[in-house]
Image: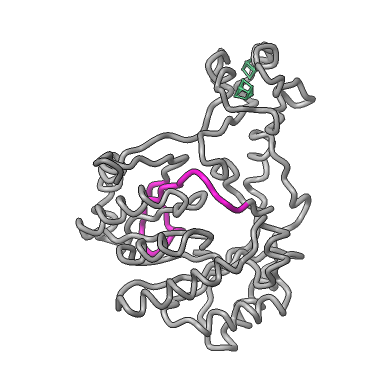
Amino acid sequence: MLFGKEPTGFIFDVKRYSIHDGPGIRTTFFFKGCPLSCWWCHNPEGISPLPAPTYHGNRCIACGRCVRECPRCARTFGPNGIILDSTKCVECRICEQICPTRAIEFVGKEMKVEELIRLAKKDLAFYDESGGGVTFSGGEPLMQAEFLIACLKALHSQEISTAVDTSGFCREEDILLAAEEADIFLFDIKLIDPKLHEYYTGVGNERILANLRSLDKKLVERGRGSINIRIPLIPGVNNSPENLEAVIACVLSLRSVSGVNILPYHSIGSGKYKNLGLEFKMGRTQPPSDDEVSQAISLFASRGIHAVKGG
Ligand code: SF4
Ligand code: SF4
């Protein structure tokens, strides 16, 4: 904490009563900012570290004020409403202020630790009942490490269980500090081949895999905390037997893994890309079939690893 100033964080969503972000019933806080740009990301509004403009076409009355008054000419009329060229936008928020129908909104809100804790504690009874707690997701929560660790400490001191949903692309010292407080890490492994990883996510995976090993060692030393490996199963990207075998070898080399979640790809977030003026690179990629998901689960089971669909 710099000069005693309490850290604050940028949050773009809060999901209460979540049952897919760790065990039990949870409150999930979605942190702004991610160093990766995965083609299939279903929360693209979380990629920018700052509040990002989004467009709700159903509220737009086509008055054209945002097009006329944008100082960077970043907005134009398109066949289905207003189009944003995100490469020109400087996030000055003029369009948000002048839009008469709130069709343009900036996603993301600054929050203090105590505000987050107050919100999380509203569902204490559900956590106790279900073995749930609070999950930090994103974006990449470790991009706001100081704020994240302050929240983890505050929740830990109140005996509220915590989970950190991470890509693992962060500073090693930050994930090790988080490992002193958090109970569960939901750790994504997307691709083992570093070149393919870079092609589809914008970054190599060397740092991610090194952090995974360091986190595993730390949790073993601590004698508390576990890692849930999460694999988004994406046809044509990472569902090859070679990649899955390499993931299995990686999982088998770790000692604090409590389970593997296979998350079938879906394109539900694709509409958000247009609203944000971003390109959706997955095109018409279809979700994996039930058979493909079962085959992946069986492959893990054949090596003695308990994997489940979703989670
Ligand atoms: S936020 Fe972006 S789109 Fe909106 S007025 Fe400013 S530059 Fe233009
Ligand atoms: S200012 Fe608002 S209502 Fe008017 S065209 Fe732009 S988005 Fe639509």
- Tag count: 0
Residue 187 in percent (x, y) is at 49, 66
Relative to 80, say whether 64 is above or below.
Answer: above
Q: How is the image coloured?
A: one colour
Quarter of the displayed picture in which ligand 1 can be seen: top right
Relative to 279, say whether 18 is above or below.
Answer: below
Side (left or right) of 179 relative to 280:
left
Farthest residue, direction front: 3
Relative to 123, say whether 212 is above or below.
Answer: below
Q: Please report the residue visible at 41 percent of the width from the left and 43 percent of the height from the top.
A: 14
Q: Nearer the viewer, residue 274 or 97?
A: 97
Farthest residue, direction left: 158
- Displayed quadrant of residue 56: top right
- Displayed quadrant of residue 185: bottom left
Residue 73 in percent (x, y) is at 71, 19
Give the residues in magenta.
15-36
Q: Nearer the viewer, residue 122 or 3?
A: 3
Q: Please report the residue visible at 28 percent of the width from the left and 49 percent of the height from the top.
A: 123
> Does 266 lie within the magenta span?
no
Residue 166 in percent (x, y) is at 49, 60
Side (left or right) of 124 relative to 296:
left
Q: Please report the residue visible at 67 percent of the width from the left and 40 percent of the height from the top.
A: 273
Residue 10 in percent (x, y) is at 43, 39
